Amino acid sequence: MEEALPQRNILTLEGWWYEDGQSGIHGTCDSSTDCPHEPDLAAGYDHIADYLAALPDDSLLVNLRCHV
């Protein structure tokens, strides 16, 4: 799975944003220190790969490449 899905940032269906396998931040919160919500994934790429593999077969994955 890691070869097909290189480490990326991810936004989960539940509204959590994970950057480079770090701890997540909930979409309604400004920072992880002020967030009262419990993350839906543990930190680390393996958890992200497992999350993606467990999505329903009709899920649409979108890969965005942004240049700033």
Image: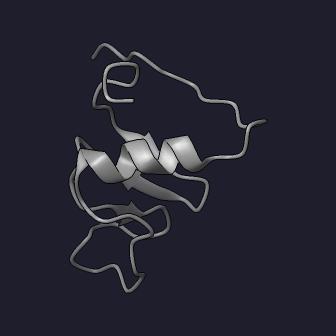
Q: Quadrant of residue 22?
A: bottom left
Q: Nearer the viewer, residue 28 or 9?
A: 9
Colour mapping:
one colour
Q: Quadrant of residue 36?
A: bottom left
Note whether 44 is above or below 5 in the view shown.
below
Counting from the top left corner in percent of width and height, residue 56 is at: 72, 45
Counting from the top left corner in percent of width and height, residue 4 is at: 40, 19
Looking at the figure, which quarter contains the N terminus?
top left
Residue visible at 39% across and 25% down in the picture:
5
Note whether 24 is above or below 60 in the view shown.
below
Q: Nearer the viewer, residue 46 or 12?
A: 46
Residue visible at 21% across and 77% down in the picture:
33
Counting from the top left corner in percent of width and height, residue 68 is at: 27, 17
Q: Seen in the image, is 37 located left or right of residue 55? A: left
Residue visible at 28% across and 67% down in the picture:
31
Residue visible at 26% across and 45% down in the picture:
45
* Residue at the farthest bottom position: 36
Counting from the top left corner in percent of width and height, residue 3 is at: 32, 20
